Image (cartoon, coloured by chain):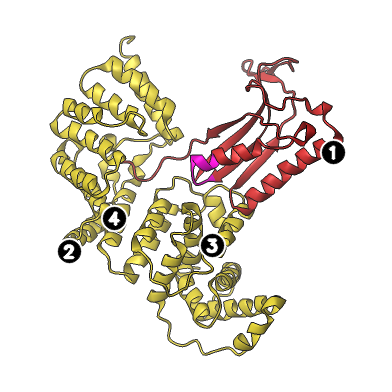
């Protein structure tokens, strides 16, 4: 019973095996990819392991505090950042091994030519609340 | 409305439906419906006979479900006429439900969810909130668990040890929504203790009470962790400690030692010390020796190294630590503490920082980071 974040980076991760940009896929291949993602989430809901899944817009701005009574400073968006987080899925599973197994399945989503894209997903455990029994 | 009383009736009501011929999965669903209805209706219109109300409403829901299910049409003949309620051996039903919900074919998270619903009488929504998952996910986890045990006979004898592991998981879970999982685990373990006479059930109940007694002292107002040695012992719940110690002593007198009794004995020795300095570490080490013998667990050996460091000095603790695998959770934190007590502050600070980096929860990470910062800022003052 632990939560893990499956994080999808578009940049910053090692190159996937089937590395064709999505806009070069056929429309059917895109549909098949989206269907795979939806089916995967639906299946995890059935197994009682799904918590959340979200996609992010590719561009964001940097924001920081700029002192009392002043509006926050914004910067960007920047065309080229080192990393781009595309989205995530949060799962609640019995073990780390299960989290890795599911990340492997998610990474098998079909891409160009209907072949699995083998994209790299980052698996990060959530920091939980402290346990009741402490010694 | 007394919600705890309402929930304590749930296992017996499920048992009644099962003995009238309903299968466990359908009976449990019907009783959950009745429970949700009771939570809605009782505050304005409390029934005179709570248990009778639940049985009647649940049975009606069960019949509705059976009728709605065409595939089950044939069964209707059997269930159509309402049988007399008959005597209710509630304690037996409760025990059977505990066994079924902790069945070895279930994963730990499924067993926990099913136990909280069928024995604990919590709603799916409450369980989902307590474990911070969507209600739909928890509903699926529960119905999947029920399918997994659908072939298990309700009256099949089970293993108390598997039930205890499930209850321990509930108690140890840090999350909580509107349900206090630690208090719920204690309530369920009390219920188990009335249904079955077993020294390890008593051991687990004592362990829970002794840890729960310290809860108010464990966290500072800002939410940060207060280590055992620094806790305000005046804030410990002395009634819970007295009850836990009494239950433990009665269990130990039966001379059938087990893991939970030994863990409770360690907790009792902490509870018994008026100040941290007066802790009987020599006896605590002896109990950890028993625990090593009973479980062989590397985590127990790690705790033993801490106790040994207190009983025989930090060098002895470090020697015991050297025999263990450095990849164990909390190894770095223990090493940092022992090095600090041994006077090697630079190593301790480095290890505290390393331990913070590996901490499994936020409160512990903050605590360990503060320890590193405390040592690192000594020279600059």
Q: Residue at x 25, y 35 (%)?
A: B229
Mark 3 Cα-neighbour bin, 10 Å: few <14, some 14–19, many ≥20: some
Q: Which mark is residue B240?
A: 4
Q: Does label 3 or label 2 sit earlier along the sequence? A: 3
Disc 1 is placed on an element classified as helix
Disc 2 is placed on an element classified as loop
Q: Is residue A70 left or right of residue B118?
A: right
Q: Do marks 4 and 2 share a chain?
A: yes
Mark 1 Cα-neighbour bin, 10 Å: few <14, some 14–19, many ≥20: few
Does residue B186 lie above or below A80 as drawn?
Answer: below
Q: Is residue B86 left or right of residue B216?
A: right
Which residues are drawn in magenta? A93-99
Q: Is residue A7 left or right of residue B366?
A: right
- Callouts 3 and 2 close, C-beta under 8 Å: no
Asked whether the viewer can see residue B47, the reply is no
Where residue B63 appears, x then y in whole percent?
Answer: 64, 80
- Callouts 1 and 4 close, C-beta under 8 Å: no
According to the picture, the residue beneath numbered tag 2 turns out to be B254
Q: Which tag is nearer the camera, tag 4 or tag 2?
A: 2
Q: Which tag is nearer the camera, tag 1 or tag 4?
A: 1
Q: Do marks 2 and 1 share a chain?
A: no
According to the picture, the residue beneath numbered tag 1 turns out to be A28
Q: Do marks 4 and 3 share a chain?
A: yes
Disc 4 versus disc 3: distance between alpha carbons?
38 Å
Q: Which tag is nearer the camera, tag 3 or tag 2?
A: 3
According to the picture, the residue beneath numbered tag 3 turns out to be B148
- Subunit of mark 4? B
Q: Residue at x 34, y 9 (%)?
A: B380
Mark 2 Cα-neighbour bin, 10 Å: few <14, some 14–19, many ≥20: few
Asked whether the viewer can see residue A31, the reply is yes
- Callouts 4 and 2 close, C-beta under 8 Å: no
């Amino acid at each position: 019973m632990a939560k893990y974040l499956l994080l999808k980076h578009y940049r910053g991760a090692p190159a996937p095996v089937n590395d064709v940009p999505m806009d070069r896929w056929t429309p059917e291949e895109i549909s098949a990819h989206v269907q795979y993602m939806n089916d995967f989430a639906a299946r995890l809901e059935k197994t009682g392991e799904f918590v959340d899944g979200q996609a992010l817009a590719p561009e964001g701005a940097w924001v920081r505090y700029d002192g009392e009574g002043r509006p926050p400073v914004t910067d960007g968006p920047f065309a080229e950042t080192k990393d781009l987080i595309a989205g995530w899925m949060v799962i609640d599973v019995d073990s780390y091994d299960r989290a890795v197994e599911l990340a492997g399945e998610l990474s098998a989503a079909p891409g160009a030519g209907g072949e699995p894209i083998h994209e790299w997903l980052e698996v990060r455990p959530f920091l939980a609340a402290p346990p009741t029994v402490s010694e | 409305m007394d919600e705890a009383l309402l929930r304590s009736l749930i296992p017996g009501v499920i048992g009644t439906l099962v003995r009238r011929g309903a299968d466990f999965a359908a009976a449990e669903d019907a009783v959950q419906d009745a429970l949700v209805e009771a939570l809605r209706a009782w505050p304005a219109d409390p029934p005179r006979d709570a248990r009778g109300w639940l049985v009647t409403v649940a049975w009606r829901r069960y019949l509705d479900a059976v009728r709605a299910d065409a595939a089950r049409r044939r069964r209707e003949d059997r269930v159509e006429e309402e049988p007399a309620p008959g005597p209710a051996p509630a304690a037996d039903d409760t025990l059977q439900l505990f066994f079924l919900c902790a069945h070895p074919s279930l994963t730990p998270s499924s067993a926990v969810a099913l136990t909280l619903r069928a024995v604990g009488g919590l709603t799916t929504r409450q369980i989902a909130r307590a474990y911070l998952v969507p209600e739909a996910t928890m509903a699926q986890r529960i119905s999947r668990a029920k399918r997994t045990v659908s072939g298990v006979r309700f009256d099949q004898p089970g293993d108390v040890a598997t039930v205890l592991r499930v209850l321990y998981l509930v108690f140890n879970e840090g999350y909580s929504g509107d349900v206090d999982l630690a208090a719920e685990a204690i309530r369920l373990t009390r219920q188990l203790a009335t249904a079955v006479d077993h020294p390890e059930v008593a051991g687990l109940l004592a362990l829970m009470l002794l840890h729960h007694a310290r809860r108010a002292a464990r966290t500072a107002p800002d939410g940060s962790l207060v280590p055992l040695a620094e806790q305000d012992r005046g804030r410990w719940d002395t009634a819970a400690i007295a009850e836990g110690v009494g239950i433990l002593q009665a269990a130990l007198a039966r001379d059938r030692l087990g893991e939970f009794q030994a863990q409770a004995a360690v907790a009792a020795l902490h509870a018994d010390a008026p100040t941290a300095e007066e802790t009987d570490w020599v006896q605590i080490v002896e109990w950890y020796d028993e625990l090593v013998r009973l479980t062989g667990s590397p985590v127990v050996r790690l705790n033993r190294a801490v106790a040994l460091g207190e009983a025989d000095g930090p060098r002895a603790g470090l020697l015991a630590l050297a025999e263990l695998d450095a990849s164990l959770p909390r190894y770095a934190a223990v090493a940092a503490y022992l090095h600090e007590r041994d006077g090697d502050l630079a190593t301790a600070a480095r290890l505290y920082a390393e331990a913070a980096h590996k901490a499994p929860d936020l409160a512990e990470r903050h605590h360990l980071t503060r320890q590193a910062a405390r040592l690192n800022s000594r020279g600059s003052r």
